[in-house]
Amino acid sequence: MEMIQETPALSAYLASDEAVDHEHPLVRDVAAKLRAEASDAYTYAKAAYEFVRDTVPHSHDTGDMRVTWRASDVLAQRTGICHAKSHALAALLRAESIPTALCYQRLTDDDGSNPMVHGLVAIKLPGQSAWSRQDPRGNKPGVDAQFSLDGERLAWSVRQECSEVDYPVLYAAPHPAVLRALRAAPDRPYLWRTLPVAL
C-alpha cells in the first residue's frame, strides 16, 4: 500500500495505552511464551499474528455477544471483533519492541450496502523500509488472511466500485470514534449499530 501516512516519531508506535496495554502482566506472559519459540523478530511477529488470528475467535463468527476492546481483556476472554483483535496483536508486538500501528478500511456488503470500518495493523520489522499491513481478523470460508511482508494477504481487498476505502493513516492509538463505540457497547448487537461507518 503506497499511500501510508505515519506520524513523525516511530516511538509513538511502541507506546502502551489504555487499549494497547502491553505492560499488562498477561500480555507480557503471552509475549514471553511466544518469544521463547521465536528465533528473531520476523518469527516472533508471525507467531504473534497467528496466535491472535487463530486462538482468539472473532466474536461474530462464534456468536459471542461479549465486547472486548483492551488487549489484555481480549487475550483473557479469547474473543473480540477485528478492532479488539488488532489491539491485542499490537500489544503483543509492541511488547517486543516491534513498531505497530492501527489502521482501517471501509468495507461494505457485496452490493455496496452496509458500510463498516474494519480494523487491522501495520508493522515495521528491523531492516524493513516500508510498513506491512497484517489482518488478524480470523479466517473462515472465503477469508484467508496470512502473515506476509512480500505483498498483502489481508482478509479483504477494497473495491473502489463499492465505495470501499483503504485509509492511509497509521494511528499510534485506536481511532477515537472506534474506541468510543467499543467502550460504550454492552453487547455486540449494540456495537454493530454504533461503530462508525466511515472515518
Image (tube, rainbow, N blue to C red):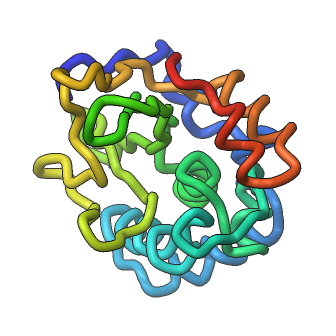
In percent of width and height, residue 20 lies at 70, 46
Q: Is residue 165 found left or right of 22 in the rendered image? A: left
Q: Is residue 194 found left or right of 109 in the rendered image? A: right
Q: Is residue 2 found left or right of 164 in the rendered image? A: left
**Which residue extends farthest left?**
150
Q: Nearer the viewer, residue 83 or 32?
A: 83
The N terminus - image quarter: top left
Please indicate, yes or no, whether residue 160 appears anywhere in the rendered image.
Answer: yes
Residue 47 picture quarter:
bottom left
Residue at 65%, 32% in the rendered image? 195
Residue at 73%, 33% in the rendered image? 179
Q: Nearer the viewer, residue 140 or 27?
A: 140
In percent of width and height, residue 75 lies at 70, 70
Image: 114 above or below 36: above
In percent of width and height, residue 73 lies at 79, 63
Residue 12 picture quarter:
top right
Image: 111 above or below 72: above
Residue 122 picture quarter:
top left
Q: Is residue 162 found left or right of 35 in the rendered image? A: left
Q: Nearer the viewer, residue 148 or 58?
A: 58
Residue at 27%, 47% in the rendered image? 156
In percent of width and height, residue 117 lies at 49, 32
Residue at 38%, 52% in the rendered image? 135
Please indicate, yes or no, whether residue 96 appears anywhere in the rendered image.
Answer: no
